Structures are given as C-alpha cells and as structure tokens.
Amino acid sequence: MSSAARPPAGIVGVVGLGNMGLGMARNLMSAGFDVLGTNRGPAPRAALAGLGGRVAASAAAIGAEAGIVFVMVVDAAQTRDVLFGQGGLLETMKPGGIVVVTATIGRAAMQALDAPLRARGIALIDCPVSGGRQGAEAGTLTLMAAGDPAAFARCRAVFAAIASNVTHVGEEAGMGQVVKACMQGLVGCIYGGIFEALVLGVKAGVPAETLHAVIGTSVANTPLFQSAVPAILQRRFAGTGSSIGNTTKDLTLTLALSAETGATMPITAAAQQFFQAGNTKFPGEDNQCLIKLLEDVAGVQVRARATPPRRTGSSSRGTAGGSARRAARTPRAGH
C-alpha cells in the first residue's frame, strides 16, 4: 500500500489506560503525537483528558482515526474484545493501520489474531513490555516486538517515545510472547528468592535494613530487589504498580508454553504455585505481598526499624569518601 493511502501515523491510539497505558499515552503526547485513548472505567479517561489527550467513546472510534493503535489490556479475552467485539477496532480501522498488542496473552492467543488482521490489510505487532508502571511513566520500557519488519520500522518513532530498549525479536506473531514468557519465568523465580532470603535473615536475627544494604550492593542486586524491598520495609503491599494478579497470569502462560514445547521448568513451576497462593490469599495486592505468606510461617515481619543501620568504611581507609566509593563499585560476578 502506498504511503499516501495509509492512516496518519501522527494520530496514535491507546486502548487501556491503566497502570501502564496512561504513562505510555503521556509520553506519546510529550513526543508530539496526537493521542486518542479509551478505557472501560471513567477515571483513567478523565486522567487522559487532564493530560491533554483526546478521549474516545470506544475502540471503534479510535480505529476510525488512528494509524497505530496500542492495545494495553490485561489478557487475551480483553484483547479479542477490543479487536473483534462490538465497538471494536476492526469495525473501523483502515487497511494499512498497525495494531500493537502490548498485553501479555501467550503465543497461541497472539498467533490467532494475526490472520484476521492481515485479511483486513492491518499489520499486527506482537509487543509485550517490561518495566512496570515506573517504566511506563518514565518512558524507559523494554519492548520485545515481533512482526513484519516494514510495520516495525513504521513504529520506531512511537516506540522511541515510550521505551529505552526496543528489540525486534522476530517476524512471526507470537515470538514476542515467547521472549516475555522466558523473562517472566525468571522474574517469578527472582521474586521468590528475594522474599525467602529476607525472611531467613530476619528470622536469624539480622535487621531487614542490613540485608537490604548488603544484598543491594552485591552480585545478587537486581531492579526487582530495589523496587520490592523498600516497599516491604514500609509494609506497602498495594498501589505500587506490580499486580500479583498479572504476574500470576503471566507465570501461568509461561508454564503453558513449557508444556507445549516440552521444556521442563521445575523452579518456575514452584514460583507459579507460590504466586497463585499469594493471589488467592491477597487478591488485588502487589507482588511483594507474597512475603507475608513466608512471614506467617516463620513468625517474623520484615519491616523497617526506627533507626536504619549506619554504613562505615574499612579501618584501612577510614574516610567517608572511601566508603562511598566502595559502595558505588559494581560487584564482580561470583562474589
């Protein structure tokens, strides 16, 4: 299709203005795009309007105008409804448009979307994301995008507005979901290890702040550790933008891919069961709420003390500057 026949790329749609979609919309507007968004609940729609975005009554209203539309919803059922349901995108979206599905829905569900869109002359970019609400707000998401290279190239400017790491992981729909499934399995295992380590240390008599200070400057430090531990110390288990429900769903998709391919994932399977238990016990809370399950068994709480521990340098250095320099060093692998 000639470039003259394509819908205008300057109008970008966002369906789903939740934890991540609203931040993405704001960064798209900051980059100069005309953003048209919608959401099932009224509060996110009002928030978009307050930021200067345009609010659409439905996904179909977005499809009538936007050349590129992000679908940032929770699961496969919601994604299908946005595309094919009453008032859905495909009622109005023009040939030459691009649908970017940033939801984590699994390989099979993503592949099932491809043929119906192609039949209408619409390109599908399978593009799950990582970075959470903080990454969406900061414009520093990681994107794992799969789809037609030409369509991917047309999305470069919009991707640059919302992400700092963009990788074209393949041409086939579903490959983005595969990469996300691998990553999410690792995320579940890392979270489980963080929570176990904290409870073990506190149960054995080490202050939680000391564990945070030492592990946070060691080879075991990760962004997940640095985001989860301060929330745990402050006993903040909801409203931090890391839904345990979503992670449980994602881990379940990872294990489904494991079963489909025959790749054995015993550690991830344990993590999925851990998250499922937490999601049942603490529905609506965030990932760090899982630590409460372990705390109940151990009979301790991982919380901040009134006075945090004071870091000091070694006696051979003896200066605050030397201590600060040592704390800033990147730990070597294996230590």
Image (tube, helix red, strand yellow):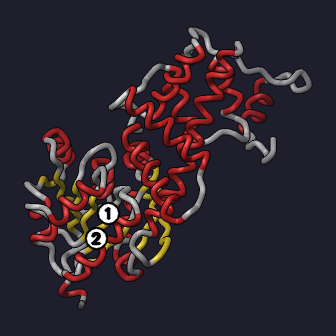
The residues bearing labels 2 and 1 have C-alpha atoms spaced at a distance of 10 Å
Q: Where is residue 94, by image quadrant? A: bottom left
* Depth check, front residue: 152 or 290: 290
Is 269 above or below relative to 206?
Answer: below
Secondary-structure class at tag 1: strand
Q: Is residue 100 visible?
A: yes
Type of amino acid under label 1: Val
Please tell me how crowded label 2 is: few (under 14), some (14-19), or many (20+) other residues with Cα within 10 Å: many
Is 11 above or below relative to 141?
Answer: below
Tell me: 278 left or right of 198: left
Q: Where is residue 29, by image quadrant? A: bottom left
| Quadrant location, the C terminus | top right
Type of amino acid under label 2: Leu
Q: Residue at x 49, y 57 (%)?
A: 181
| Residue 101 disc label | 1
Is 307 above or below relative to 198?
Answer: above
Please tell me how crowded label 1 is: few (under 14), some (14-19), or many (20+) other residues with Cα within 10 Å: many
Task: Look at the numbered discs 2 and 1 and tell me whether their residues touch, using CB distance below 8 Å.
Answer: yes
Secondary-structure class at tag 2: helix
Tell me: 57 left or right of 216: left
- Residue 20's x, y, as percent? 33, 47
- Residue 152's x, y, as percent? 39, 75
Q: Residue at x 38, y 49 (%)?
A: 136
| Residue 59 disc label | none
Q: Residue at x 30, y 53 (%)?
A: 75
Going by the picture, which residue comes out furthest to the right? 316
| Residue 113 disc label | 2
* Depth check, front residue: 264 or 55: 264
- Residue 291's x, y, as percent? 52, 26
